[in-house]
Amino acid sequence: MAEQKKIAFLVDTEGIEQVELTDPWQHVEKAGATPRLLAPKLGQVQGFHHLTPADTFDVDVPFAQADPKDYDGVVIPGGVANADFLRMDRDAVAFVQGYVAEGKPVASICHGPWLLVEANVVRGKMLTSFPSLATDIRNAGAQWDDLEVQVCDMNGWTLVTSRKPDDLPAFNREALKAFGL
């Protein structure tokens, strides 16, 4: 029997757009894979419904102890604060760089692509995001389009991106395909 796939969800300690964490997480579980929550440190992280605090979630692995080789997929949920804090976390950036170097798929929604920009892995890619990131993405050498979902296989790895929570059905469908689930 094949080993169960593990999907890493990368978040900061707060500011996570909760539905962009929980909805893909549930789809990954339903597809038979194991979701794992990675964050700067062990403990709990705070989800939000836009600016209103929501639920907390237990961290499985701190970024500094996470090995990109252990995961078959990465999901980067949005949330303005979440994404802004993530892109300033050296261990999160290093994890993404190491993971992309393995040629494995990434799915990122809303403000999540800020981490990919900071990791300098989007050059030559086509992606979408929350519209306020368009200039940052273009300045990082990628093409940005206002689409429900964008799947890009350029540069030896698959990137699935979406703009906002309303896009989650398409995002989940394409992320699961990219992860081979």
Image: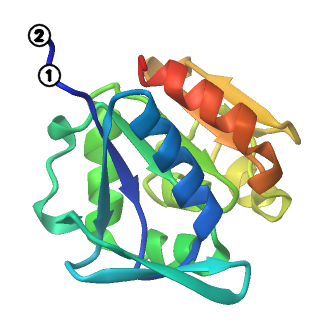
Which amino acid does the dot numbered 2 rest on?
Met
Eyeballing the image, is 128 above or below 173? below
Marks 2/1 in contact by CB < 8 Å: the verdict is yes
User: Residue 66: x and y, percent?
Assistant: 16, 55
User: Residue 32: x and y, percent?
Assistant: 35, 28
Of helix, strand and loop, which one carries label 1? loop
In this rendering, the count of numbered labels is: 2
Q: How was the colour assigned to the protein in this rendering?
A: rainbow
For residue 145, what is the image quadrant?
top right
For residue 150, what is the image quadrant?
top right
Eyeballing the image, is 117 above or below 149? below
Q: Quadrant of the N terminus?
A: top left
Q: Nearer the viewer, residue 159 or 29?
A: 29
Rendered residue at 28%/76% (across/down): 40
Rounded to the nearest angstrom, the CA distance separating label 2 from label 1 is: 7 Å
Q: Nearer the viewer, residue 145 or 8?
A: 8
- The residue most toward the front is 30
Q: Which residue is mark 2?
A: 1
Q: Nearer the viewer, residue 10 or 29?
A: 29
Rendered residue at 66%/75% (across/down): 80
Eyeballing the image, is 45 above or below 112? below
Which amino acid does the dot numbered 1 rest on?
Glu
Local packing at callout 1 (Cα closer than 10 Å; few below 14, some 14-19, many 20+) is few
Local packing at callout 2 (Cα closer than 10 Å; few below 14, some 14-19, many 20+) is few
User: Residue 29: x and y, percent?
Assistant: 40, 39
Q: Quadrant of the C terminus?
A: top left
- The residue most toward the right is 146
Residue 111 visible? The answer is: yes
In the picture, measured across the screen, residue 100 lies left or right of residue 145, that is left
The circle drawn on residue 3 is: 1
User: Residue 111: x and y, percent?
Assistant: 66, 62
